Amino acid sequence: MLSQPLEPIKTDSLKDVFVIRFEELILSGKVKIGKKLPSERELALQLGVSRPVVHEGLVELASRGLVSLKPRFGAIVNDYRKEGSITLLSSLIQYQKGKLEPELMDSLLQMRVLMEPEFARFAAQNRTEEQVREFHEILKKEESANYKNIQNITDLDFEFHLLIALASGNAVFPLLLNSFRQVYTNLSGQFFKDSRVISTVHRYHRDMVQALELRDEKKAVSIMKTILNHGEKYLRKRIDSETS
């Protein structure tokens, strides 16, 4: 038994609905940067909710960098590019449902090239024997996977990259990678539709595990860069073919 009773499970709270609605209004540009929002009282009346709901929602939006709350003045819409946090990046990805505009996709691909080779470098230094066993378990699953099951292939690929982040020994690296899970799997799922890409990626994974076992930092970094360059090349090729 738990020491304290659990609260009843509820559907989305009014505060969460308020936050989602205003995120969409701001991220879509329907509510402009620098605009002063109506008072809490006016918003409550317009939306048919209580003032505490509005207040809590505005506080949450402020924590994400979407608005600034000024005493006796109200809420002002921020330029989220200057004020936003990693929480907002996750919201932005969710708002676009993983289908990113070119500028944001380019930015995320550039960030992966900067981050993940370092994940691999630290993983080669810090991986444990238990993590090596976990890598081999993933390799076994990849070897026996049905290439027609794109979702499974995509999930295993993310699991592999996440384990590299975990093996790095850095507590923040896996959190960063998890923040991008939705868009990561959306993008990788597109080029895994080509079975030739799957077999190539799985070969790279085997090479990576060998490098990590040997604690070969240079080789691990080199393989990760190859993986990322290969993925970007085929992803852009596929996107271009779909838009042409």
Image (tube, rainbow, N blue to C red):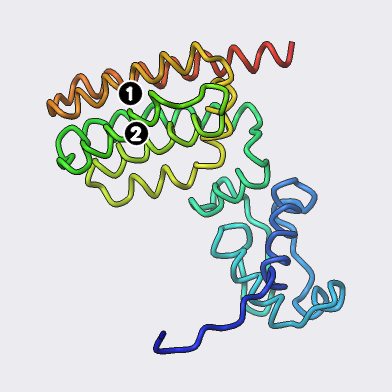
Q: Residue at x 33, y 28 (%)?
A: 139
Q: Which residue is mark 2?
A: 138
Give the amino acid type for the residue marked by disc 2 in the picture.
Answer: Ile
The residue lying toward the viewer, choosing from 127 and 5, is: 5
SS under mark 1 = helix
Give the amino acid type for the residue marked by disc 1 in the picture.
Answer: His
Q: Residue at x 68, y 64 (%)?
A: 19
Horizontal and vertical percent for residue 14?
72, 73
Query: Residue 122, relative to residue 6: is it above or below?
Result: above
Q: Residue at x 74, y 58 (%)?
A: 35
Determine which quarter of the picture holds residue 60.
bottom right
Horizontal and vertical percent for residue 110?
45, 27
| Res. 79 mark | none
Q: Which residue is mark 1?
A: 205
Q: Nearer the viewer, mark 2 or mark 1?
A: 2
Circles 2 and 1: CB distance less than 8 Å?
yes
Horizontal and vertical percent for residue 13?
68, 72
Quarter placement of the C terminus: top right
Query: Residue 27, relative to residue 114: is it above or below?
Result: below
Q: Mark 2 and mark 1: span between their CA atoms?
A: 9 Å
Q: Is residue 36 left or right of residue 149?
A: right
Horizontal and vertical percent for residue 92?
62, 46
